Amino acid sequence: MTARVDFYVLESDVPDGRLRLACRVTEKAYRAGHRVYLRAGSKGEISVLDALLWTFSQSSFVPHALAGTNTVTTPVLIGHGAPDPAAAEVVVSVANEPVVGFSYFARIAEVVGGKASEKASGRQRFRFYREQGIEPATHPVRL
């Protein structure tokens, strides 16, 4: 399977913008009926993303659990390590590294923050996917 790779790039630096955007992209994939792995950039970001999924929008509910817990029927998993292809079709990533095993997933959504360092990391990931024969799509986003 060849994964579709999309980059969602914040146009400006907004506090917690990268994580809030990841929640928005995750919600959209969940509402489209996909099982989603929300990949944190660090173990510390897992708890932040867990809390944000409950609060980022007043009108949304995104059922989720931490990867490795009782997750057989949970449509959205949050974790830090490599995603399990058996548990998700879509990976939403806020990590600074490309998704390991990306070709096992239908879609990869790379979320890039508005800081210069985050954009530089995003460009490196973009080049990585291109080198693998994938032509990523880019979506500028304003929060």
Image (cartoon, rainbow, N blue to C red):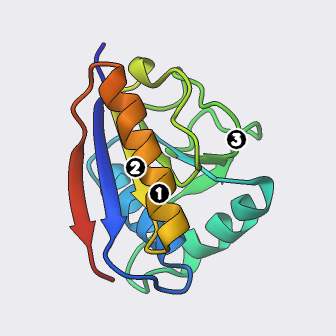
Disc 3 + disc 1, Cβ < 8 Å: no
Left/right placement of residue 53 relative to residue 34 reads: right
Residue on which the image places disc 3:
67
Left/right placement of residue 15 relative to residue 82 reads: left
Residue on which the image places disc 1:
120
Residue at 28% in and 45% down: 6
- Residue type at mark 2: give it: Arg
Instruction: Give how far apart the Cα atoms at labels 3 and 2 are.
Output: 28 Å
SS at badge 3: loop
Residue 20 lies, with reference to residue 50, above or below; the image says below
Q: Quadrant of the N terminus?
A: top left
Which one is nearer the viewer's eye here, 57 or 12? Answer: 12
Q: Quick one: label 3 or label 1, which is nearer the N terminus?
A: 3
Residue at 70% in and 36% down: 81
Residue on which the image places disc 2:
123
| Crowd class of label 2 (few under 14; some 14 to 19; many from 20; radius 10 Å) | few
SS at badge 1: helix
Which circle, 3 or 1, is nearer the viewer?
1
Residue 64's quadrant in the figure? Answer: bottom right
- Residue 91 seen in render: no
